[in-house]
Amino acid sequence: MLKSSARCWLAGLGVAGAFVAAAAAPAAADPVDEVALYFPDTTVALGDQGKAVGARLFTRVTSQFHDATVRYDYRSLAGKVKLEADDCETPEQGVLLCSEPSPVYVDQTEGGFLTKVNISATADAKAGDAGDLKITFRVGNLEKATYTSRIQVGEGVDLAAGPDAEFDVKPGDSFEAPLTVVNVGKTTVDGVVAYFDNDYAIRAVDRFSNCLYADERLVACEFDEKIPAGEARSVTLNYQLGKDTYAPGSQYGNAHFMTPADFEDLIKQLARTGAKAAKHGTGPKLGLTEASAKVARSVQTDTDRGNDFWNMSINVGGRNGADLEAIGAELTAEVGAEITARVGFRNNGPATLDRHRSNSEVTFVDVTLPAGTKAVEVPQNCAPFKGDGTKQTDGGKPGAPAYRCFPGTFAKAGEELTSDLRLRIEEIVPGASGTVKINAPCECQGGFKDDLKPANDTAKILLTATGGQGGGDGDGGSLPITGESTALIAGIGALLLTAGVGGYVLARRRKTRFVA
């Protein structure tokens, strides 16, 4: 499960970059025409069979494309690398033209996959050869999206991780995690990077100068030691489990060992996504063994990625729960006016809820509108709700009397998660009110069933007339919702550098607010 999660993050990095690109598109553009393309920078090994890599598409709305083709232009590396795939032809050296064998389906949240191409080095290539890969996605004769990636050639090595570890820890406790990396190949490894995918609760204690951090999260450690073939190196890391960790429960983390060149391919994409930048620590240098003299590093890539993950699982003991409190709204408007109802919940803690590993909702929020109002604009994470306990698929559809909202996979202790629903006042019905109910049951994955204070799981949406048919002469505008405070970046717990990269941009797209 942990290995899969890390790989999913690497793919999810493209999701983030594409969503950021889409978010920057002009508001007047047709959502169907907003297509973003992503292809990761890739290092391939000399004498290896190559790597199968696939482009991904992202759109603002769920779409399906017929008669799709993809053009791969790698003429800057012609004769050095080769791209191959089924349903493809080579109109000229350094160009691969592929026809998608079936319609390309693109989910507005998860994106869509194009046929993978195998990239390999030729017999004429040498380590250090590099060039651009220009990709063009067309539908019929219409160009829909382009992207430029970087391809380089390196020496093949094989890194393997040591045995996995399991810990029994309580919230707030510290623990030590030993990591071991083994060179199981035949070539000396010239430097290694440990890239970490740890749950939000797992906090780094130290700040080493050769490690990258995002707030309390350890992102990666770069080691410049050479590891001869057949030898192993170890290091011990100090962690602390956050005091806001939910208990009893489980937390997970892993380290992915990779070459500096492979890490460079990965880290470049962070800048393209607009993700929060990680920073080097200011403390001493962390070493695997005594550092060797600095020499020019050769380009290398790992040829077997199935054995280079180290996993840790944490059994969280004790009791540390969470109180989710519903947030309603007090609205004042006249008939015919439009007004925003900001509704949702606040996590009063003491525990943070983190479900990104299982990709399940922390809770479900049911919103029933006051009689006399009509929803005219609804965020994508809210769908019309019929009260049958099932998840609806038509998120963002206006006009329904009730909605079920899906706030996401992360709820930090002390913060609010709210959604904005734009309502038009059709008539003022005396005494009418709506409701916001959290922790609602759902015949789907996720939800929260162990709330510390179920009594505050329901709040009201109150509507007061200010003029027109309802009496008074208000301006029809919206008033601030009580409880609102300074807006924070969504997905703080994930820190935008693991699964939270996609979570942050997805939250922006959903128009879900995270406030302190």
Image (spheres, rainbow, N blue to C red):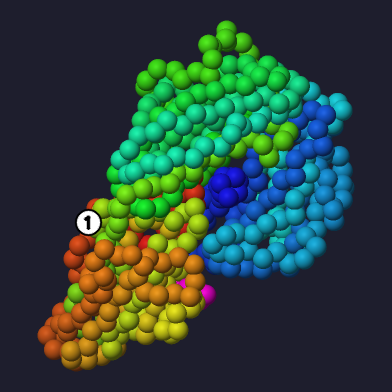
What residue is drawn where x is 33% and y is 38%? 173
According to the image, label 1 marks what residue? 485
Is residue 67 placed above or below 331 in the rendered structure?
Answer: above
What residue is drawn where x is 32% and y is 81%? 368
**Residue 258, visible in the rendered structure:** yes
What residue is drawn where x is 37% and y is 53%? 248
Horizontal side, residue 13 vs residue 344: left or right: right
What residue is drawn where x is 60% and y is 37%? 309
**Residue 487, visible in the rendered structure:** no
> Which residue reaches farthest top?
293
Front residue (pair 2, 294):
2
Horizontal side, residue 460 vs residue 61: left or right: left
Is residue 387 placed above or below 44 in the rendered structure?
Answer: below
* Label 1: how many Cα within 10 Å (few below 14, some 14–19, many 20+): few
The percent coordinates of residue 127 (x first, y second) are: 75, 23
Is residue 239 placed above or below 199 in the rendered structure?
Answer: above
Q: Is residue 12 magenta?
A: no
Q: Quadrant of residue 44?
A: top right
Horizontal side, residue 269 vs residue 324: left or right: right
Please report the bounds of the magenta region as a residue range: 393-397
Horizontal side, residue 421 vs residue 218: left or right: left
